[in-house]
Image (cartoon, grey):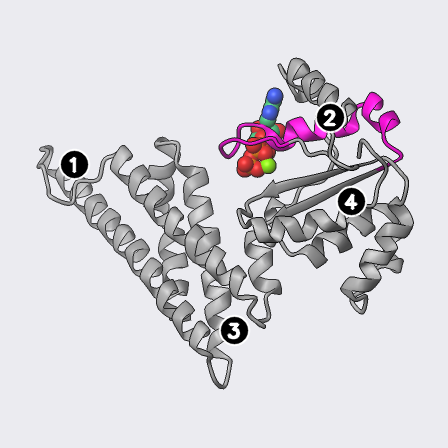
Amino acid sequence: MAEFASSLIQSLGSAALHEFARINGLKDELERLKEHVETCKAVLLDLDGKQEQSHAEQNLVTRLKDVLIPADNLLDEFAIQDMINKRDRNKLKKVLHPYSLKKLDMAHEIEKIQKKFDDVEKYMFGLNLNLNVSAVEKTNSEWRETGSYVPESEIIGRDDDKENIISLLRQSHGDPNVSFVAVVGIGGMGKTTLAQLVYSDEKVQNLFEKSMWVCVSDNFDVKTILKNMLKSLLPKEKIDDTLTLDNLQSMLRDNLNGKRYLLVLDDIWNESSEKWDKLRTNLMCGARGS
Ligand SMILES: Nc1ncnc2c1ncn2[C@@H]1O[C@H](COP(=O)(O)OP(=O)(O)OP(=O)(O)O)[C@@H](O)[C@H]1O
Ligand SMILES: [Mg+2]
């Protein structure tokens, strides 16, 4: 199956497909599709290398197959359509063909497949497989990682939104000591950029004694989030992989106790309230207004 994914990656590199994507504004979609397939390939390679697969792993392989095959079919359809177009162009006549893929069809089909990839990846990360996941995370999460820096001069038209959020941050909302402000919206609309603008504003920096920026992405794992919070606060040599959850919790309490802090959690996808509650418990250590 990993070889199947490899051949799919090759098909995704076809010049005709790239030209089609460029003309029809589907370049980003195509790029994301390729990243998804690369993630699947990395997982399949790791699973292939395992002596014995658990039931969950076997189920994952089936689910990966169920998404890679439709992706392959779509690319086959595209290749056929491309051949027909070229043939027709040679004959100087147009023929309506059942495989006819217009821009919107293609965009729609890609969207359907992306959704399937998103679902299977969520399932995969939820399994907490003991794989060599560095390759997996690199292809999917690392390119999404964000930091707090923003080139402010290039950002336009967000002054009011920024001030609105700052005014929310100034209020404490009755909760014991930590309040939450959520910025929600479709991909690419500027949520991260707005958060960066707020985070780097001088008023905000003066309002909080400690500030932390953590990019969460697909892996909403409480221990990882706590570790990354500490990386924002302490020299990085103080945070190593041997630290237990208990160590991290007590280090966080030591650093945040009684202090009003700001934490940005960027690129959140998690909808499990159980995981949120677990994280929330760990965030209660700051001063009121955090
Ligand atoms: N107000 C703005 N002015 C100029 N460029 C902007 C503005 N807001 C966002 N951008 C640019 O648009 C792109 C997408 O913005 P951003 O990453 O903030 O979106 P997002 O909502 O966080 O997306 P995602 O849901 O994928 O994380 C970035 O390249 C960013 O620099
Ligand atoms: Mg973002």
Lateral position of residue 235 relative to residue 27, left or right: right
Q: Position of residue 8 (x, y in %)?
A: 37, 59
Left/right of residue 130 with respect to residue 147 in the rendered view? left
Residue under numbered circle 4: 284
Amino acid type at circle 1 is: Arg
Give coordinates of residue 98: x percent, y percent. 11, 43
Query: Which element is circle 3 on?
Result: helix
Does 188 lie within the magenta span? yes
Q: Earlier in the sequence, mark 2 or mark 1?
A: 1
Q: Secondary structure at mark 1?
A: helix
Circle 1 residue: 89
Distance between the alpha carbons at the discs numbered 2 and 1: 54 Å
Amino acid type, callout 3: Asp
Q: Residue at x 52, y 66 (%)?
A: 127
**Residue 261 locus on image (x, y percent):** 83, 37
Query: Which residue is under mark 2?
Result: 198
Q: Quadrant of the C terminus?
A: top right
Q: Earlier in the sequence, mark 2 or mark 4?
A: 2
User: Which secondary structure, mark 4?
Assistant: loop
How many other residues sit within 10 Å of disc 3, few (<14), some (14-19) or many (≥20)? some
Mark 3, residue position: 46
Disc 4 marks a residue whose amino acid type is Met
**Among numbered discs 3 and 1, the one appearing first in the sequence:** 3
**Image height of 67 relative to 260, above or below:** below
Badge 4 vs badge 1, beta-carbon distance below 8 Å: no
User: Between tags 2 and 4, which lies in front?
Assistant: 4
* For residue 218, above or below residue 154: below
Q: Is residue 142 visible?
A: no
**Mark 1 CB lies closer than 8 A to ligand 1:** no
Q: Amino acid at mark 2?
A: Val
